[in-house]
Image (cartoon, grey):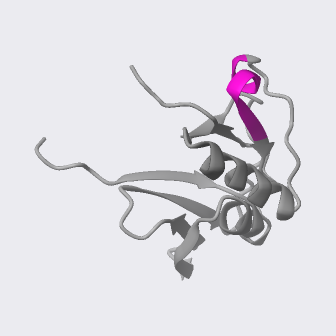
Amino acid sequence: MNSIPTLRVARPSDNLEALLPFYRDGLGLNLLYRFENHNGFDGVMLGREGASYHFEFTRAYGHTAGKAPTEDSLLVFYIPDDTEWAAAVARMRDAGFDPVPAFNPYWDKYGQTFEDPDGYRVVIQHSVWTL
């Protein structure tokens, strides 16, 4: 591959409106697109303009999605800059989301974990990702 592919992380939810404050206000993502009753699905897509990733959350009519299967279902954002990391954590707290203890204590060493309304978790990791 010569180009960077766009990554879409897609998952179902029972309450799209409850997710918006977490991903939009807390994580600072933009609402990129919203659709209703597209073949029996409603959905929202959140991300950052020009980023090579975005998140899609859908609700299917007549189907229950339920909660996250484990406390270790994670998305991890690596933010090495001290000021940017502190601002990201403050934005989550200001949006009404307090950190939760990570299931894997590794994430508590340099990061903070937050749980969305569906029970899925996001780690704001204060380090550089390397292989």
In the displayed structure, does residue 69 sit left or right of residue 77?
A: right
> Which of the image's four quarters has the C terminus?
top left
Q: Main secondary structure of the magenta part?
A: helix
Rendered position, 102 above or below 22 = above
Rendered position, 64 above or below 30 = above
In the displayed structure, does residue 69 sit left or right of residue 10?
A: right
Q: Is residue 110 magenta?
A: yes
Residue 50, picture quadrant: bottom left
Identify which residue is drawn at 35% across, 55% down: 52
Residue at the outermost front position? 83
Identify which residue is drawn at 68% across, 53% down: 88
In the displayed structure, does residue 56 sit left or right of residue 112?
A: left
Q: How many marks?
A: 0
Identify which residue is drawn at 86% across, 54% down: 97
Residue 90, picture quadrant: bottom right
> Which of the image's four quarters has the N terminus?
top left
Identify which residue is drawn at 53% across, 68% down: 45
Rendered position, 29 above or below 11 = below
Residue at the outermost left position? 2
Residue 28 position, x and y percent, is: 63, 65
Q: Is residue 89 magenta?
A: no
Write the start and end of the magenta stretch as one range.
106-113
- Relative to the observer, which residue lies in front, 9 or 125? 125
Residue 113 position, x and y percent, is: 76, 37
Residue 55 position, x and y percent, is: 52, 58
In the displayed structure, does residue 108 sit left or right of residue 7?
A: right
- Relative to the observer, which residue lies in front, 78 or 9? 78
